[in-house]
Amino acid sequence: METTALILSIIFFVAGLLGTILPILPGSILIYGGMLLYGFMTKFSTLDANFFLLQALVLVLVFSVDFVASAAGTRRFNGSKQAAWGAIIGTILGLIFFGPLGIVIGPFLGAVVAELLRGIQINQAIRVGFGTLVGILGGTVLKLCAEILMIVYFFIRI
């Protein structure tokens, strides 16, 4: 049973890492789900509550990276506070209206629209939107690093 649990967990881990790169699957949730599945299938023989609480904390951190990274990229490319908020609101609305692709489209459009509403020229507004995309790419790298650490810690603990 332990071998089956491990194989299924690894499948979840791979799908989760792919989901982080291709925003079609909920990456970090799949990774955490693989850990939970392993725990249930092995009757939590090697993974205790502290392990799952720590991993849940990392999961929350990974979720917050999407919002913070797009706002940071916006600010780095001389976007205003309104553009940073536009990127955050755009991320939420993008996910609602565009599904997984909304994580890329939403922040870009949110930052651009916020800058245009402030009266900024279109070229500068698009530059700020581009900064948002740079932030998202940086955030993706951070998320991948955190998820890999989650997986490594899982293997250390089992």
Image (cartoon, rainbow, N blue to C red):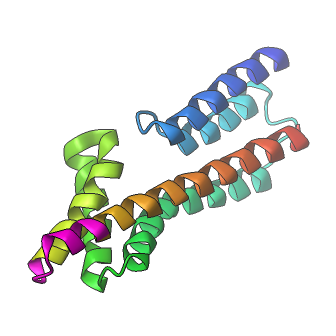
Give the prevailing secondary structure in the magenta stretch. helix
Magenta region includes residue 124:
yes
The answer to which of 23 and 7 lies nearer the viewer is 23
Q: Is residue 13 above or below residue 5?
A: below
Q: Nearer the viewer, residue 41 or 126?
A: 126
* 121 relative to 10, above or below: below
Report the span colored magenta: 117-127
Number of dots carrying numbers: 0
Identity of the residue drawn at 20% across and 67% down: 112
Q: Compare residues 89 and 117 and report the one nearer the observer.
A: 117
Quarter holding residue 86: bottom left
Residue drawn where x is 34% and y is 40% of the image: 100
Q: Is residue 135 shown left or right of residue 49?
A: left
Residue at image position (52%, 42%) is 20
Quarter placement of the N terminus:
top right
Left/right placement of residue 94 relative to residue 133 reads: left
Q: Is 78 above or below relative to 110?
A: below
Q: Who's the residue at 63% across and 48% down the image? A: 144
147 with respect to 24 (left or right): right
Residue 70 found in image quarter = bottom left
Is residue 9 found inside the magenta-colored segment of the image?
no
Residue 13 rendering spot, x and y as whole percentages: 66, 32
Give the percent coordinates (x, y) of residue 8. 69, 20
The C terminus lies in quadrant: top right
Which x, y percent locates residue 2?
83, 20
Residue 5 horizontal/vertical position (percent): 75, 21
